[in-house]
Amino acid sequence: MADFDTVIHGGTIATADYLAKGDVGIKDGRIVAVAEHLSGGDQRIDAGGRIVMPGGIEAHAHIAQESSSGVMTADDYLSGSISAAFGGNSSFIPFAAQQRGQSVDDVLATYDARGARSVIDYSYHLIISDPRPEVLTDELPRAFQRGVTSFKVFMTYDLMNLGDGGMLDILTVARDHGAITMVHAENNDMVKWMNKRLAARGLTAPKYHAISRPQLAEEEAINRAIQLAKLVDAPLFIVHVSTEGGAEIVRREKFNGAKIYAETCPQYLALTRNDLDRPGMEGAKYICSPPLRGTDTQEALWHHVAHGTFESVSSDHAPYRADETGKFLNGFDVPYPKIANGMPGIAMRLPYLFSEGVVKGRITPEQFVALSSTNAAKTFGCATKGRIAPGMDADIAIWNPETTRTVRQQDQHDNMDYSPFEGMQITGVPEVVLNRGAKIVQDGVLKAAEGQGRFFARQPVDLRGKPGFKVPEFNPAQNFGADLR
Ligand code: DUC
Ligand code: ZN
Ligand code: ZN
């Protein structure tokens, strides 16, 4: 029997900590050896001139998900996972969204059926919109038990927003079970108030979407969410940070010891609010929340990407076609609040970050690995993923760092009819992608079969190295002896 099923040889191995020339040996879907030279192997993959790194873990994607207003994403687990694989990902963690009145068990059963089509490994973050008492006491703990150890909540949207008290309740449940709360942080009343003023003046074109969701609305909500998490000493992950002010609050609180994690997304680095002002209803394609900002914000967010404020750069892939099934479900000439919110990007997240980050010298290859895979694995408890080391799943992407291409919608593998990255010149291509040792993409060809991906259970969040934030009122010695945990 051969020592290895596969040896990837002669490449530059990139991890979050180092770069080294060497070989990777794979057996039964796992990495079993990493060494300067490995001989043998039933199959040898020549990685000369290539970078061998952990397959991406896409930690923010909306796949086969109905929005709270009932619009279904264009991608299901088949097309979404194929698109992710071509973008250098070996696994992903899309959202499993609870509708009001629905039990968490029912949500997970629904998404188990949808997820079964995936070509890459998958898990879910829940979205909780209806935290009834039984959800908090029984259903969420059951979900954590089966390895769904994260969920997202909203501070905006009337149908989703939990309010501050609701946030405190659910943060506490997460803390007590080693789960992590993710939050979409925008001040709901600020946005509603802006919407009213804009509507009263007839300012309803797509470009006003950006005006309706001010930077202050995000900054205020990020700050509030963090103070709520600090009150109960719970971990909190801020999704899609789109403002310099928001990133600075995250940075300050994180480095003061609060259990704060965060991400930004390529669209906030690559695009601006001017894209919402394209002719006709073209701007609708660029409606996402929080909205695109200005070029000054792009520079500031790059600075934070390069200096450790963010654990991850995630796509927030929220694919709604520019037709009556998606963006224009409510009609073609409607005010911006009636246009579906989100844009595709699961295939472009890593190529964009590599090209604009590594190739342009803004981040190192090691940072690229951390931001694309290793940190997501640590933050979200993916114990066997995100690293090239013996014992880990052989989830590997082999990148050609020199190939340059122009992004075109017709080359994408999703179910979309546009790409926000259309026309951009991108250097660096994931030529071969493996998931548990099996090639899923090779030189532009899909090698995986429908349903080949497996659900993976995740561990409780690892808070080692996070001192936390004990407020005096929760210290029995300072609050007349009461134990308020
Ligand atoms: N939030 C997301 O994370 N994605 C799409 C829309 C939204 O509000
Ligand atoms: Zn969101
Ligand atoms: Zn999202």
Image: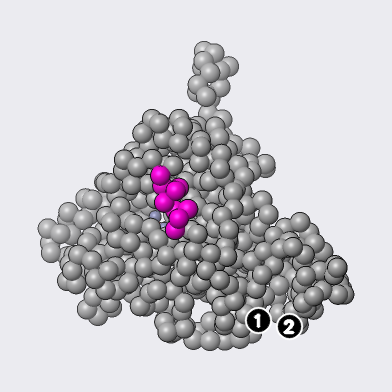
Residue at the disc numbered 2 = 49
Q: What segment carries the magenta color?
A: 106-114
What kind of residue is marked 2? Gly
User: Residue 400 got which mark?
Assistant: 1
Q: Amino acid at mark 1?
A: Asn
Query: In the image shown, does 209 or 414 lie closer to the viewer?
Result: 414
Q: Residue 404's x, y, as percent?
A: 57, 86
Residue in the image at 46% along x and 64% along y: 77
Residue 111 within the segment the image draws in magenta: yes
Eyeballing the image, is 357 above or below 425?
Answer: above
Q: Quadrant of the N terminus?
A: bottom right
Whether residue 294 is visible:
no
Q: Quadrant of residue 432?
A: bottom right
The reply to whether discs 1 and 2 touch (Cβ–Cβ < 8 Å) is yes
Q: Is residue 462 above or below residue 39?
A: above
Q: Quadrant of ligand 3?
A: bottom left
In-image side of 246 versus 180 (left or right): left
Q: Residue at x 47, y 38 (%)?
A: 140
Sort mark 2 into few (<14), some (14-19) or many (20+) by Cα contacts within 10 Å. few
